[in-house]
Image (cartoon, rainbow, N blue to C red):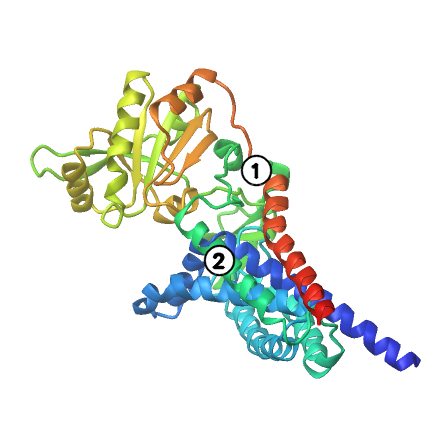
Amino acid sequence: MKPTESLMKTGVEFSRIIVGAVFVFSGFVKMVDPLGFTYKIQDYLTAWALQGFSTLALPVAVGLSMLEFLLGAFILLGIYRRWAAMLIFVLMLFMTPFTLWIAIKNPVKDCGCFGDALIITNWETFYKNSVLVVLSAVLCFRWKRVYPLFSGRFQWAPAVFSMVFALLFSLYNVFRMQVFDFRPYKTGASISEQMRVDPDKADVYRNLFIYEKDGKKQEFTEENYPWNDSTWTFVEMKTDLVKKGENPKIEDFQIFRLSRDPASGQYVEEDDLTHEILSDSSYTFLMTSYSLGEADKSSAKSLNRIAGLAKKHGIPFYCLTSSVPDAISKWAEATAAEYTFCNADERVLKTINRSNPGLMLLKNGRVINKWDRFSIPGDKKLEKQLSRQDEASKPNNTLVLLLIMAIFLLPLGFLKWLEGRLIKDK
């Protein structure tokens, strides 16, 4: 093999592995949390004043996540390599200038290309795409050098299986608790600890004092401002960021108790319960619903049962919602709810639990367990949880990941074996 051919082969294989792995990872982590990607798309639509298309955000989120995963998988498997390489290149030709625009205009905090699994800045996203567009060009124009793991006549089988896997996996994570939770409210996480940051690692600010003398303005720092010089007149004070530091992972977790006004019958905001809830050394149940008007009422009976059990054990039960007072009143009347309603930020509630409604169990500000609306536990199971008085049992993410990989890779291995047998029999 000539040196140039060897170099080209190495370049194609390198591009194939990097592009395929990035696309599979990016698609997979968004398939893990399709609703999170949906909210990110809605953020873009809001920034562009296109809220009328918000209803399309979920199917678009599922479709784009699957497309990324499948294109990456097809390139790695070498199936439909020409079309996969071309689509990846076209996609990167669009995404690279688009992410440059995002980096410059900064319409959203982060692009969400890797979901909550790996948060990178908008500029880092652009740099990543700048590399990928070059590697995808290599694949597009040298697609014949991508080694196919399946023959052309049999490649439809792994393609169909991959599409079915991606669709079912995405839908599971839409309707059930996500198999991986990358958010700061995951089981085992301490909310109170994540609301603080080491002062030595925090942002460093500098106060600047503007004084005027003889019609001229001048800036002073805290060390040299003329506080005792009457010839200077104070104008204003401003604060500059000197050094960017770390921000708390949780910045907007606040809970305000709501009470029903006897005169109007409407729910009004009262005291702040945040510190009380996070410092409670016993258990606390938090039902979450960013919109009670859109919440699944079929789970109301189970939630009422949990609220009754909590009352029996002397455990607080709060419903956190960002709903308007009328929606709260309608939910309370329709479901015969007797628990306390509280006001919380809509984005926080969507981050805590994608399910609407959902349920979370806290102790000392730490998340002990979480349930979606389909998995609210029965009395016996919950009694067992409460009697143990133990800390959260963190899910074994490594084991779950290995199981998912086995579900995806073992059938592909079987299809490869089956292809070999069919060719041999001929």
Mark 2 element type: strand
Q: In the figure, residue 359 lies in which quadrant?
A: top left
Q: Residue at x 56, y 62 (%)?
A: 162
Q: Is residue 273 left or right of residue 129?
A: left
Residue furthest toward the bottom?
Answer: 141
Q: Residues within 10 Å of mark 1 (few under 14, many from 20)?
A: some
Instruction: Identify the amino acid type marked 1.
Output: Val
Q: Position of residue 58 (x, y in %)?
A: 39, 61
Name the residue carrying label 1: 197
**Residue 271 visible in the current orientation:** no
How far is mark 1 from mark 2, CA to CA? 38 Å
Q: Image quadrant for the C terminus?
A: bottom right
Instruction: Identify the amino acid type marked 2.
Output: Glu
Q: Position of residue 48 (x, y in %)?
A: 39, 70
Q: Is residue 304 left or right of residue 75?
A: left
**Relative to 378, does residue 103 appear above or below in the rendering?**
below
Please say if the residues under marks 1 and 2 sit with CB atoms less than 8 Å apart. Answer: no
Q: Is residue 358 left or right of residue 30?
A: left
Q: Position of residue 46 (x, y in %)?
A: 37, 65
**Relative to 47, does residue 146 appear above or below in the rendering?**
below
In terms of sequence position, does the residue under pointer 1 or pointer 2 come before the other?
Answer: 1
Q: In the figure, residue 385 lies in which quadrant?
A: top left
Q: Residue at x 67, y 71 (%)?
A: 132
Q: Residue at x 68, y 62 (%)?
A: 416
Q: Residue at x 39, y 24 (%)?
A: 382
Q: Is residue 141 left or right of residue 194?
A: right
**Relative to 220, does residue 16 appear above or below in the rendering?**
below
Q: Position of residue 301 (x, y in %)?
A: 24, 34
Name the residue carrying label 2: 212
Query: Quick one: 133 or 89, which is closer to the camera?
Result: 89
Query: Quick one: 361 or 125, which is closer to the camera?
Result: 361
